[in-house]
Amino acid sequence: MIEFEVPKPIAQQSYVLQTVAENMMRPVSRHFDEHEHEIPWDYINFMHMAMRATGAGSLAPREEKPKDKEKEGEKKEEKKERPPIGYQMLAFMLEMLSWGDVGMYLVTPGGGLGAAAVEAAGTPEQKKKFLARFGEEKPAFAAMAMTEPQAGSDTSAIRATAVLDKTTNEWVLNGEKIFVTAGHKSLEESNGFIVVWATIDPKAGRAGMRSFVVEAGTPGCKVTKLEHKMGIRASDTASVVLQDCRVPFENMLGSPEIQTETTKGFKGAMATFDATRPLVAATGIGVARAALELLKETLTQQGVVIRYGLPRQKLTNVEREVIDMEVMLRSAWLLVIKAVWMADNKKSNPLEASMAKVRAGDVVTKITQKAVELMGPLGYTRDLLLEKWFRDAKITDIYEGTGQINRLVVARNILGYSGRELR
């Protein structure tokens, strides 16, 4: 059963992260927006040190070392009774950091979408091998490399290939990936990796899709371009070329028995998005909350009071607009909370994950746009961060599945149609 009281560990983390957002992110937000591709190492190193000390925000496995058997038994019993809150904690963390600056949040070390892919589709051995590095002394990053010049939302059109060289027992990857979030930092600035989607059988469509971990420094994998973007400019977005890139056989996520697992590779990769789409939604909600709070603060300074509890016909237009924005924001957040609660409790959540992503993408775009409008010329200038938040907002509706694709996912789940039946 979902509880609406914020668990104590999450409340404590949120308090600390608000301090980080206010003192480490907001003061330099404009600088890193205007100096795209400059890396905010002060923020990265601080967050890595903090997360390494606490384990917060990381999917890396943490081994408990009890002092004696009696305490070990007590810890196991305590663990059974304590409800899982891992993805819920991440949602609160991402919302708060995105309130500070969503572009800077995207450079937070800890694995991101790449680590989530390993968590969703990897074997226990792969999780231990690849996720443990996020607890090491040096900050590490990971990214998902899926989109290609001819294959965006239609993953069946992916042309990157993976061919098994039986003489060396290695996968040989060839292809081009674009719009890889954190691709540059994952491959060239850390001991990280990217998770590459490729096909082992081009004729099989989605059934032939598999995910492969390509570690930083692997020959044949190269960043060829960094994008100049409208928003989230503190985060790098890279193009990556794979040319006879060889990775070990065991770097294919999931079971290596590919002959008997014709669809598991694709479904395993899709499970990544069921976990991360609500987290992307949380980042959009953080941006929307920042814009709405600034608007309300400015209105208060100008003597405008929102009179809650009155019938709509007795409210001014500005009051109605603000109340509607608050309703949109809270409803989107509730969808996020439901989706991450389901993820924590190992419940299937593709419907809820896509609903949260769709709603947050709509809400953050509408709220930031309306805030700019209600602030007038001041909202359009660079004197405030509001115009930046407006630019940052749109990405919520685009990456990790566009709004259109997620609406299809919602419709298919509600109506019971397959991807072939409803496109």
Image (cartoon, grey):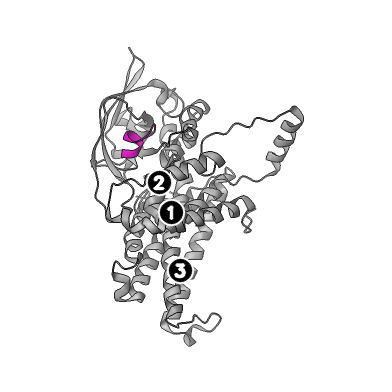
Please identify, in this view, whether the residue under mark 2 or under mark 3 is nearer the observer: 2
Residue at 51 percent of width and 25 percent of height: 125
| Tag 3 residue | 293
Q: Is residue 190 magenta?
A: yes
The residue that appears at 51% across and 48% down in the rendered structure is 90
Pick the front one: 200 or 26? 26
What residue would you read off at disc 1?
24
Q: Is 10 part of what is drawn in magenta?
A: no
Measured along the vertical axis of the image, is residue 293 above or below residue 42?
Answer: below
- How packed mark 3 is, by other alpha carbons closer than 10 Å (few <14, some 14-19, many 20 or more), is few
Residue 310: give x, y in percent of width and height: 54, 84
Main SS category, magenta section: helix
- Kind of residue at disc 2: Asp
Q: Earlier in the sequence, mark 3 or mark 1?
A: 1
x then y, percent, for residue 116: 46, 39
| Residue at screen point 25% across, 47% down | 227
Asked whether 51 or 74 is in front, the reply is: 51
Instruction: Pick whichever of labels 1 and 2 is earlier in the sequence.
Output: 1
CA gap between label 1 and label 2 equals: 9 Å
| Amino acid beneath label 3 | Glu
Q: Which mark is residue 42?
A: 2
Please state which amino acid type lies under the numbered disc 1.
Answer: Met
| Mark pair 2, 3: CA separation | 27 Å
Magenta residues span 184-191
